[in-house]
Amino acid sequence: MERYDPSKNSWETVASMSRSTLGVAVLAGELYALGGYDGQSYLRSVEKYIPKVKEWQLVAPMSRTRSCFAAAVLDGMIYAIGGYGPAHMNRYVMGRSLCPPGYQKTPLGSLINPSVPTRGTALPT
């Protein structure tokens, strides 16, 4: 992973990660990398990047493998939307509560149509 510093107009490598086609979200000042593909397998693992120590830390995995999907944050939850895995397209929207008592996976419903690849973002209003 690289980080851009606009004050220096330069990039620097801050932490490596071996996955592609992942979902990314920022919540509570931490960067989350969700699912993706590691070159051999589709992933359901989730890692969060902690800037102060420049390290990735594993957190609870998603309920299914997911690649090429959208991730967004709304009301303290990370949403994983659409995408695909090794044998399926994902119609499911998965919410992940990051409030105490811990990391909870909450199925939120289904998309009307499976969607691949899915990209998107949520902006505060």
Image (tube, grey):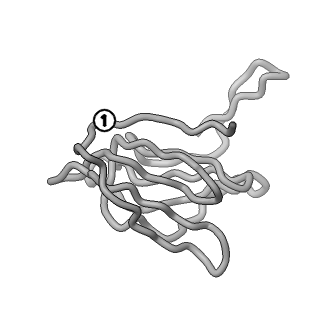
Percent position (x, y) of residue 33? 52, 51
Which kind of residue does numbered mark 1 sit on?
Pro
- Above or below — where is 56 with respect to 72? below
* Residue for point 54% across, 68% down: 59
Residue at (35, 67) in percent of width and height: 63
- Secondary structure beneath label 1: loop
Q: Where, quadrant-wise, is the N terminus in this rendering?
A: top right
Neighbour class for label 1 at 10 Å: few (<14), some, many (≥20)? some
The residue pinned by badge 1 equals 117
Q: In which quadrant will I find the C terminus? A: top right
Quadrant for residue 122, please give it. Answer: top right
Q: Where is residue 39 in the image (x, y as percent from the top left)?
A: 30, 46
**Residue that lies at the very extreme toward the top in this rendered image:** 9
Query: Is 96 placed left or right of 66 in the picture?
Result: right
Callout count: 1
Horizontal relation, residue 41 to residue 13: left or right:
left
User: Which residue corresponds to the image point at 67% horizontal and 42% vertical from the top-left?
Assistant: 14
| Residue 92 locus on image (x, y percent) | 32, 56
Which residue is painted at 66% across and 53% down in the image? 27
**Residue placed furthest toward the bottom:** 101
Q: Measured from the top left, where is residue 123 in percent x and y?
A: 63, 36
The front one of 111 and 50 is 111
Q: Which residue lies furthest to the right in this view?
A: 7
Q: Is residue 3 above or below residue 51?
A: above
Front residue of this view, candidates 116 and 56: 116
104 or 111, nearer to the observer: 111
